[in-house]
Amino acid sequence: MTIPVRIDYWDILQRSIRIAWENKILWVFGFFASATSGNLMSWVDEGRPFIREFFESRPEVIILAIAGIVFLWLVLFVMSLISTGALVGSVKDLREGQRATFERAWNHGLKAFFGILALALIAVVAFLAVTLVCVVAVVLPLVAGVPGIVISVLIGAILLVPYLAFLFLLAFTITYAERAYVIEGEGILEALQAGWELTRAQFWKSMVVWLMMLLASLVFGLTVVLALLVLAVPFIIIGIANVTAALIFGIPIGLAFLIVVTGAFGTFVYSVWTLAYYDLKALMPPPVPVTPVPSSPAAPPTPAAPSTPPVHPAPAVPPTPSAPPTNPTTPDAAPAAPTGPTESTDE
């Protein structure tokens, strides 16, 4: 089998844009998959003074507000996990020639929920453990005073590059492990191993994909800001005459716009990484089949010796009677005739 030697990044972007545009039903999952990344929270900064004043005047509402925020975060977190499996499974369906429907995507998300949750918890634990070790290593020398500051700065400079490398390795490993879990049906540990092997073998190509996504995110953010400014112009004009009407209509429209474009962009991002997983995996050499070493043929079993019948003692043979003594002369020879007196021939 011929193994490809390069990856077509531009083709991945084109296919991902086509998937996101032709399957708008997936924007729902794209929104929730991106909801926990902070893309939608920047608008809160402008309203912080009003929010602070409101809660300070009504302290009894603080508990309900905290409970509501925690509940909303849990809903977003659960939906983010479901949406991850839904988007990855839908891209798999599209690659296999099947339609991407909401029902199929939802079923993919529910089926993969606990596996995606386990991988997310593993990522959080690994991140916290390594970060804690690095923080302790940097902060601990500060106890020594001024000399410790120099040591802390030196340790921080030494750990910076390995720590950043760890973050990239962890992110790529979990990203590919999620796809191995959903697409290949691997177990959690097997998916982690597959994600690590793909990351280790295709790290620099994964970095190129990440840089593409970083650039795409910057372009997306700039485009959204410009679009919001254009969208706000009519409501600014309305606000000159009636601020309340401008807020009543402008805020919901602005939020709806953010939700739609975030869902579309989230679908695009997850499609890129899923297609990149397929293409990067295709670059991996096929596993070498393990040829079993032929063992020496076993010797044929030795047939069991036939059981020997018991040997019975032979019956005693009666002694042969001894022959009577024979004459020295042959018994078959006839006795000689007696000879009479010889007659005289004289006359």
Image: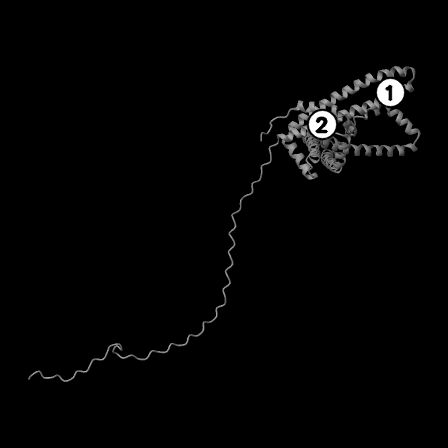
| Classed neighbour count for the residue bearing mark 1: other residues with Cα under 10 Å, few (<14), some (14–19), many (≥20) | many
User: Where does residue 127 sit, x and y in percent of width and height?
Assistant: 73, 34
Residue nearest the viewer, comparing 314 with 118:
314
Q: Is residue 288 left or right of residue 208?
A: left
Amino acid marked by disc 2? Ser
Kindly identify the residue that appears in the image at 86 percent across and 25 percent down.
48
Q: Quadrant of the C terminus?
A: bottom left
Measure the C-alpha gap from mark 2 to mark 1: 32 Å
User: Where does residue 94 sit, x and y in percent of width and height?
Assistant: 71, 29
Q: Is residue 248 left or right of residue 18?
A: right
Asked which quadrant contains residue 247, the reply is: top right
| Classed neighbour count for the residue bearing mark 2: other residues with Cα under 10 Å, few (<14), some (14–19), many (≥20) | many
User: Where does residue 268 sit, x and y in percent of width and height?
Assistant: 73, 25
Q: Quadrant of the N terminus?
A: top right
Asked which quadrant contains residue 153, the reply is: top right
**Disc 1, SS:** helix
Q: Is residue 222 left or right of residue 59?
A: left
Residue occupied by mark 1: 250
Q: Is residue 12 above or below residue 296?
A: above
Question: Which label number is shown at residue 271?
Answer: 2
Question: Which label number is shown at residue 139?
Answer: none
Amino acid marked by disc 1? Gly
